[in-house]
Structures are given as structure tokens and as C-alpha cells.
Amino acid sequence: MTLPRTDHSGEFLVFRTAARRRALVLALAVLGTTSLAACTTGSGQDGGRPRTSAGADPAARPDLRRFYGQKLDWRPCGDFRCATLTVPRDYDRPGDGETFVLPVAKAATAVPGKRLGSLVLNPGGPGEPGVRLLKDGVADDIGKGVRERFDVVSFDPRGVGGSKPALTCLTEDRADEESPAAGAGEAPLYPRTDAERAGALADARATAAACRRASGPLLPHVGTDDAARDMDVLRAALGERRLTYVGWSYGTSLGTSYAEQFPRRVRAMVLDGAVDPSLDWRQRVLGQSTGFRDAVEEYAGSCADVVGEACPGTTPGEIRTLVDRLLDRTQHEPLPVDGSEEGLDAAGLVSALSLSMYTPEAQWEGLSEALRAADDGDGTKLAALAAGDEDADGETDAGTSGGPAEDGPTDDEPTDDEPTDGEPTDGEPAQDEPADGEAPGVPEDNGDAALIAVNCLDVPHPRDAQAYWDALAPADEAAGVYGTSGVTSELVCKDWPAGTQRPHRVHAPGVPPVLVVGTAGDPATPYGEAVSLARQFPGGMLLSFEAPGHTGYGRDACVGEKVEKYLVSLTKVRPGTTCAP
């Protein structure tokens, strides 16, 4: 079984060219999804993350009681049940009337008499809507033993997907600059000259400025810590005394924040594709870009074992030579792409390669066919992969590979004319109209805007551009084009409002044993981070998955068995436990 958990998309940011947009989005997605770090080296000390003391009950705060007192009013929406949850926009000022209204969806799978509660899922991102996760069938892929004991629940985090208000970086006056094409060869992967660096800075500033114009009032309020507080309001609205949770990739950051703020509210927590919050931004870039470089190397070495004759070479050496040849070619002249005047440049090629490393068993065959076509001079299939189309058939869509975006509400999501809940208990109505700061025409898939906004708020970055230029040479030495593009992608956060987080070790006294899943060949969240995170949690457990690709739960029966025994029975995973496909 395969759970949809991609952390990337590339359609709605304002860039001078689509190539620069996609290079930034990709690198933020695969490098920044987990960059919960500051601009100083990871000291291992506690940072500035707000925490709720183990003995405190936030529901007892008078100014939060009306939010914690909500009862979800479930209504039919296709095969699911849907509701809305109202949370304060600013937890420091919950009485100011400004809120987020979050879509919630449930697959009511628990068998009467066996039900233990609700299992809350987060698919990653940041920027992935949980409602779509259920719409795409994740509940059917979770083991029967878990589904019989839990109703499966997910939600769109604040600012994401169907959240009201929702984030966007697309402004009406610049919508005509947006292009889904693969992009021209204007953005070097390693800016060396003053002119190239000035261009990279200008593009990053333009993107940040567009986000501020379109969503400025929301930007300080979409960080991971606030989203974790929302999840505690959801726990209460679900009627659960303690939370049972599974988070993939960025969802591990959300889970870690929840565990730190509400350690005694955790029943069971699975963190798959783990993030080590003690690393700084440069450590993150180097670690993850090296992971993607190594994953492409693994593709060359293991392609024949996974996809057989479809490989674009008969030996690993031939495949490596082909990839290097295409990188050199696209840095000088874009490959032709059907329906595009710009073609596929080196940034698009790096995107296609990196995005194809998440699920090798499902993606490597399509990548192989796309590389063959590119070697023959046609970049159409690679452009489709760079845009998030895993089928590489040349038909790109506007959403992530977790599910295509659509023009309007689906029957799996609440619509504006369906009655929904989420009203605080004092009778204040849930917010239906766009609030101040929400731009009109927010795209249904706003994952790119949310990804940038959350990462930049969560991660204090250097204000001096020289810090980024100083990081280029070490990144190039460690990971080549994957490293340098990762560094330059961080420029968009240079002038962003700073949050309160700093590199720190997990501080969650009283939390029960947390299960961390680490995949040995994970490019986006390197295995070493899972090892470290498991050690940081008191009583933390590590389940290792010896395979390439991103995350383990949902891809392997052995991992599924261990995870699901823990979720249902709280069965501990012994030290050294390893699964292999």
C-alpha cells in the first residue's frame, strides 16, 4: 500500500520565470519541509519554542474555553463525514475575533464495541491538506486492525487548503506572469557572478514581496507551534482525552511540537520521516541535498533491480553518464517541451530527478522513460515529473501528486452552502467570509504559498546575503547541484518575519513512548535524523526500514505491522528492530 505523502508542488508562486519558481519550490519542499532551525549552529540547547507545562490544561483558560468547548457537527460529504473547527488566529489574543476555520474530515471506520477513539493523520508538507489525504483513500490503506479500533481523521492546517482564511502568494495584478511551463535557462544552479547573485536575490525578494502583499496579516500566524495548538483544540472537539497521531515528514515536526507543548495529552504518536529540531539551516541543507544526490546515485545503481529493461542504460555507469550529460546540456540550452516556448532547463531536470526519489517502486520506471526521451531530445516527460505528475505522460496538473487540484469543492469536502459546525460555544458564528488579509481568488491548491510561509516563519534565517554565498561552496562540495540549489532556495526567507523557534533538543517531560520510523535511504528526511529524534524523546523508540525512498509506513508490510500494533495496543518496538522489503 502507498499512502499519499508528497511535500511539493509548483504552480502558484510569482517568479520571473517558471524555472526559478520551480527550483525554489522544490528545494524548499525537499530541504525546507523540515528546516526547523535558526541561522546559528545547532547547539543542542532548548530554543524559544512556546510550551504548555505538563500540569497545565489550556482548556481551562477562560479566553480559550469557547474554542475547546466546540462540538464537531459532522455532515455527510461523499464517503466521509465533514465538519469545521474554529481556532483563534492569535493564541496570545484569542478574544480579538480573528480566527481560522479549518476543514476536518473523518472516515468512520471503527467497529462499535471495539472503538478506541480517533486516529489523527497529517500527510506532511507544510502545505498538504489533510482532507484531501482522506479523499485520496488513505483510510483504506491503513490496516484493518487499526480501522476497526479508530475513526480516521485529518484536517487542513491553518492557512492550508480549505482553511478560511487561506494563504496565497498569487496577486491578481501579477497573475499574468504565472506560467506552468518548464522554464527557461535563466537561473544558474550555482550563482557565481555578482550579476547571477543579484538576480537570485531579486527573484527571492519578489516572491517574498508577493506573499506579503497577498497574505501579509496571516504570515505571523501560520507556524508549526500554532498548528500544534490547533491540533489540541481538535483533540478536545473529537472528545478525546489523549491524542493518537501519525505524521509523515513535516507531520513529524507538527507531532514533535505537539508533544513538547502537550506531553501528557499524547496517547500514541508515530513520527515517520523524522525531523531533528536540533539542526540549523545549513546543516539541514547539506544533509538533505546530500540525501538527494545519494538517492539519484542509488537510482543509477539499483535501477535494473527495480524496473528492469526500462532503465535508460544497461549499467550504472551508463545511467550516471546520461544524467551528467543532461545536466550539462540543460544548463546551456533547455530541452524542448510540448506546449512550452521555454522548455526544460537544469532547474527543471533537478526537480524531476529529486521528486522521483520519494517512492522508487512507483516512480523510477516513469523517470527512466522520461530520461530516455530526454536523451533523444524531448523534455516533455521530464517536465511533467518536475510539475508533480508521477505518470510522466506530459499532462501536468495544478496540484501535488497527492491528488489533482480541481476547479471547485469536491464531494469529499464541505462546501460553502453545506451546513457546517465549528461555532464556539458562546454562539459566535464560524467565519464564512474571507477575513482581512485573505486575497480573493486563493487557489484550491495553495501548497506552495503555505510551504514558504510556514518554513520562513519557523526558521530564522541570516539577514545578510553573504551568509548564503558562503554556504554555496561547501554545499557544492557535499552535494553538487542539489546542494547549491538548496542554498539559494533559502534566500526567500532572508527578509521574512522571524518566528520564535531555535535549534533545540526535544523537551517533552512526561510524554509516553513515541515511535519514530526511519528509512535508511530517505533523501528528504535522512535516516540519521530519525535516530537522533528517537533518542531525544524520553523512552523514544526507533523502527528502521532498510530501503530507499521517503518514509516507511504505508510502503512495507513489516513496518505496517509494527506501527499498527503500537497504535492499537501500545506495543513497544524493541531497540534495533529493522524491517526490509
Image (cartoon, grey):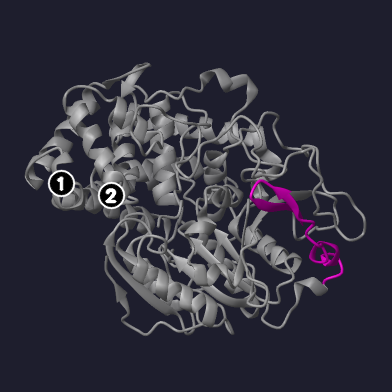
In percent of width and height, residue 511 lies at 57, 81
State the residue at coordinates (37%, 85%).
Answer: 574
> Which residue bears the numbered disc 1?
308
Residue 475 has which mark? 2
Above/below status of 550 relative to 402? below
In percent of width and height, residue 191 lies at 31, 34
Q: For this view, does 560 lie left or right of residue 480?
A: right
Instruction: Label 1: state its secondary structure.
Output: helix
How many numbered marks does the figure carry?
A: 2
State the residue at coordinates (21%, 27%).
Answer: 373
Instruction: Label 2: state its secondary structure.
Output: helix
Q: Which residue lies furthest to the right in this view?
A: 427
Q: For this view, does 412 lie left or right of residue 58?
A: left
**What segment carries the magenta color?**
61-88
The C terminus appears in which quarter of the rendering? bottom left
Between 571 and 388, the one nearer to me in the picture? 571
State the residue at coordinates (45%, 56%).
Answer: 34
Find residue 386 and report its image quarter. top left
Task: Indicate whether residue 280 is drawn in magenta.
Answer: no
Few, some or many residues within 10 Å of mark 1 (<14, 14–19, 20+): few
Q: For this view, does 446 lie left or right of residue 196?
A: right
Task: Indicate whether residue 71 is drawn in magenta.
Answer: yes
Find residue 450 and report its image quarter. top right
Q: Is residue 501 visible?
A: no
Q: For this view, does 201 lie left or right of residue 362?
A: right
Between 394 and 174, the one nearer to me in the picture? 394
The N terminus appears in which quarter of the rendering? bottom left
The amino acid on which the numbered mark 2 sits, given as a three-letter code, is Ala
In percent of width and height, residue 241 lies at 71, 77
Few, some or many residues within 10 Å of mark 2 (<14, 14–19, 20+): many
Disc 1 and disc 2: Cα gap in Å?
A: 33 Å
The amino acid on which the numbered mark 1 sits, given as a three-letter code, is Gly
